[in-house]
Image: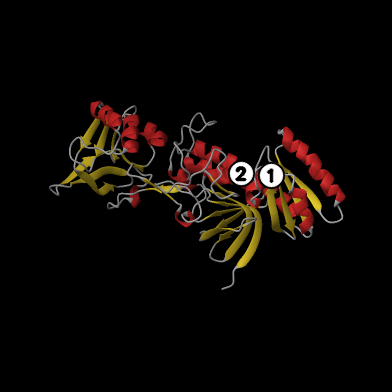
């Protein structure tokens, strides 16, 4: 089957809080933008019954409702939405190819906001009680269990730290640990604090066998890993902290990932590939919340806008028919400005043979990196969009250029 090809300025992959915010910024900047989501607009936040720590909602807000409002807002700016799965992303330098089953989207910039998913136990009835007693975020849901009895599954840093946070609300926090008594996967400081916390009770050598209840979870059946004995435990809720899996499988050969599979970015949400940005829970970061995802998405959308502007400059001013001499310089450097005068004089003498394109790298060196230009001050000569000469500026540059034009 021959695929369709559609062209956009920006493709946002993922429809959670980060993706919708990035799409909002790109769409509002009048960029032709498409958001691609494989399942549910809103992502994991739609499974949270009440969000109390998102600014602007002092009484809290239902996760589904908050995501609905974000959905309505970004669509207002003409962003196209496609509900399908992305199979691959390729970097073609001046454009990217985002491939789905039926269509290849040729875009100038990509924002990866594919999020992740909590690791599940695999116990019986688990899917039945997700958001009906089973939660994955103490910061989001702890207040719902004020004065109640809850269970935490896991003993890593996240499980123990979130468990201690839960003790500020719950009357009792039971912790199911697969290890022998006293052994945890958390750091030693957290372990010692947890063992001294009077509200925390540890159930050693146990794993979940099943989740039970009618409409909502009211019982977790644990299995003793040494004796095989089943132990029903009455609870009002259960928090799973046994790991988080970022949705980065299709990017492992393209983007730099950390040891856990998260995308590595700088503070501008830039990945190792120019023109590909990452935002939200999918990237390496300290805190994963709706509010931090929105911040990531805003930065990624803004940076995508700047990148598209640079690509347009590239196509319109440099990679075009004829001979173009590109001069890369830093406008705050006195020497670079002095060389600019010499370059302009040379271009004027040869205006019948070439065009001059001046690129200031002070605010952004993206074009310099994309084109593989040497350190400033430098010149790169293009013929019909193809680079034929590149050099840092020196006294012999003009003689070399004369041979080529």
Above or below — where is 111 with respect to 6? above
Q: Is residue 76 visible?
A: no
Q: Is 71 situated left or right of 174 in this image? A: right
Mark 2 element type: helix
Label disc, if present, on residue 301 of the rendered structure: 2
Callout 2 crowding tier (Cα within 10 Å): few <14, some 14–19, many ≥20 = many
- Residue farthest along the left direction in this orientation: 227
Label disc, if present, on residue 29 of the rendered structure: 1
Marks 1 and 2 close (CB-CB < 8 Å)? yes
Where is residue 27 shown, x and y percent of the image?
66, 47
Q: Residue at x 64, y 45 (%)?
A: 366
How many tags in the picture?
2
The N terminus - image quarter: bottom right
Above or below — where is 209 with respect to 302? below
Q: Which residue is nearer to you in this view: 77 or 178?
A: 178
Label disc, if present, on residue 159 of the rendered structure: none
The C terminus - image quarter: bottom right
Where is residue 239 shown, x and y percent of the image?
33, 40
Q: Residue at x 51, y 55 (%)?
A: 254
Q: Is 321 situated left or right of 22 in this image? A: right
């Amino acid at each position: 089957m021959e695929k369709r090809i559609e062209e956009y300025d920006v493709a946002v992959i993922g429809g959670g809080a980060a993706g919708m915010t990035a799409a909002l910024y790109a769409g509002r900047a009048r960029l032709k933008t498409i958001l691609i989501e494989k399942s549910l607009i809103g992502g994991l936040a739609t499974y949270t019954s009440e969000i109390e720590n998102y600014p602007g909602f002092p009484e809290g807000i239902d996760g589904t409702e908050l995501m609905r409002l974000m959905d309505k807002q970004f669509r207002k700016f003409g962003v196209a939405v496609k509900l399908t799965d992305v199979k691959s992303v390729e970097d073609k330098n001046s454009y990217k190819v985002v491939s789905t089953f039926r269509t290849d989207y040729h875009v100038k910039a990509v924002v990866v906001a594919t999020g992740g998913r909590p690791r599940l136990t695999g116990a019986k009835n688990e899917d039945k009680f997700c958001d009906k007693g089973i939660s994955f975020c103490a910061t989001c849901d702890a207040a719902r269990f004020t004065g109640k009895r809850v269970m935490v599954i896991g003993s890593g840093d996240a499980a123990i730290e979130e468990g201690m946070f839960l003790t500020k609300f719950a009357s009792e926090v039971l912790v199911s640990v697969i290890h022998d008594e006293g052994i945890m996967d958390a750091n030693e400081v957290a372990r010692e604090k947890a063992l001294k916390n009077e509200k925390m009770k540890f159930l050693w050598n146990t794993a979940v066998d099943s989740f039970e209840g009618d409409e909502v979870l009211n019982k977790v059946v644990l299995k003793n890993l040494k004796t095989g004995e089943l132990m029903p435990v009455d609870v009002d809720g259960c928090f799973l902290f046994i790991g988080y899996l970022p949705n980065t499988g299709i990017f492992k050969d393209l983007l730099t990932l950390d040891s856990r599979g998260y995308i590595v970015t700088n503070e501008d949400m830039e990945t190792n590939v120019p023109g590909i940005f990452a935002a939200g829970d999918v990237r390496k970061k300290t805190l994963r919340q709706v509010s931090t995802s929105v911040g990531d998405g805003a930065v990624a959308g803004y940076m995508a806008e700047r990148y598209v502007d640079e690509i347009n400059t590239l196509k319109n001013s440099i990679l075009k028919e004829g001979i173009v001499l590109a001069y890369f310089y830093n406008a705050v450097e006195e020497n670079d400005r002095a060389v600019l005068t010499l370059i302009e004089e040379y271009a004027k003498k040869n205006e019948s043979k070439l065009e001059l394109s001046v690129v200031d790298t002070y605010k952004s060196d993206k074009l310099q990196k994309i084109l593989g230009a040497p350190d400033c001050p430098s010149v790169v000569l293009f013929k019909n969009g193809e680079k034929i000469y590149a050099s840092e500026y020196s006294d012999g540059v003009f003689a070399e250029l004369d041979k080529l034009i």
